Amino acid sequence: MLSIVEGLLIFIAVSESVLGVLGNGFIGLVNCMDCVKNQKFSMFGFILTGLATSRICLILIVIADGFIKIFSPDMYSSGHLIDYISYLWIIINQSNIWFATSLSTFYFLKIANFSHHVFLWLKGRINWVLPLLMGSLFISWLFTFPQIVKILSDSKVGNGNATWQLNMPKSEFFTKQILVNVGVLLLFTLFLITCFLLIISLWRHSRRMQLNVTGFQDPSTEAHMKAMKVLISFIILFILHFIGLAIEIACFTMPEKKLLFIFGMTTTVLYPWGHSFILILGNSKLKQASLRALQQVKCC
C-alpha cells in the first residue's frame, strides 16, 4: 500500500514523463521536418534529434523499471527481464549523456571565444571532434557490457519479499557500479568543462559589451546573458539527474526504502523533460514552431 507522499511523487514522475515525451517528441519532429524540407543534414540537427530520441527512451525505461520495482518486484525474480532492462539502460543512458556532451561541445566550439591554440585547432575541426566523441561512446560500451554481465552473473535477485536485492556485499556492488559508469563519468566531466568554459567566455564578452555600451541594454549582451542562464539551468538539471540515478542505484541494495527510491525516480526524470522545454524556449526555430503549434491547437 502506497502512502500519500509516495502516491504524490509517483503522480509527479508520471506527469514529468508525459511532458518529457511530448517536449522531446516535438524537438525531434521539428528537426526531422526541417531536414526533409531543406534536404540538408546538419550536425546540430542530428545532435538535437538524437538527444530528444534518447531522452524519450530514457524516460520510458526509468518509469518502466521504477513501476516494476514498486508494484510488481516479483517480475525481476524470475526470467531474464532484469538482464534486458540492464542492457537497454546501458545503451540508452550512455547515448543520452553522449548526445548531451556533444551538444555542449558543439555550443562551446561554435560560440566560445578563446585565443588558445588548442581551442582554435579544435574549432577549425569541429566536424571531426564529434565523430571522435562517438568513438569514445563505442569504447565505453565495449568496456561497460562485460562489467554489467559480470554483475548480473555474480548477483542474484532475491525471492519472495526480498526482491531485486543483490547477493553481494554493498561495498563490492558500489565498486562495480563505479567501474560500469567510468565512461559516463568521463563524458559528464567533459560536459561540465565545456559548459563552464562557455559560461566564462560568454561572461567575458558580456562584461566587454557592458563597458563599451552605456545608456541602453545592448541586444548582444541580452542574448549572451540568456545563453548563460540556459547553460546554468542545463548544468543544474544534469547534476540533479545524476543525483537521482545515484539514489536509485543505492536503493537497489535497500529495497525497503521505497519512498527514497520513488524520490530518486522523480528526480531522475526531471532533467529529460525540464531541459527539453528550456531548449524549445531558448531556440528561436523551436520556439516559433511551438507557438505555431499552440496557435493551431487553439484554433481547433
Image: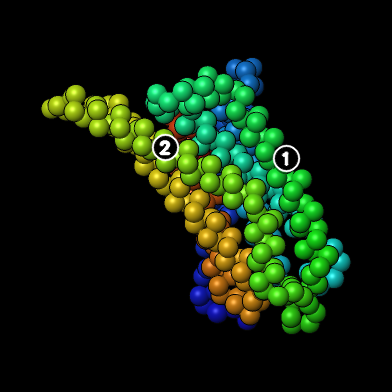
Q: Which residue is mark 1?
A: 138
Task: Note whether residue 25 is visible.
Answer: no
Q: Around disc 2, counting alpha carbons within 10 Å, would you say few (fewer than 14), some (14 to 19), or many (20 or more)? A: some
SS at mark 2? helix
Residue at the location (49% across, 26% down)?
118
In front here: 126 or 224? 126
Residue at the location (43% across, 26% down)?
116
Residue at the location (85% across, 71% down)?
78
Q: Is residue 173 left or right of residue 114?
A: right
In front here: 25 or 204? 204
Q: Position of residue 253 (x, y in %)?
A: 66, 74
Q: Position of residue 247 (x, y in %)?
A: 57, 66
- Asked if the residue under mark 1 is in contact with the one under mark 2, i.e. CB atoms within 8 Å, the reply is no
Residue at the limit of the structure toward the right, as seen here: 79
The residue type indicated by label 2 comes to Leu
In front here: 237 or 102? 102
The residue type indicated by label 1 comes to Phe
Above or below for 276 versus 110: below
Q: Which residue is mark 2?
A: 197
Q: Position of residue 49 (x, y in %)?
A: 61, 34
Task: Note whether residue 175 is visible.
Answer: yes
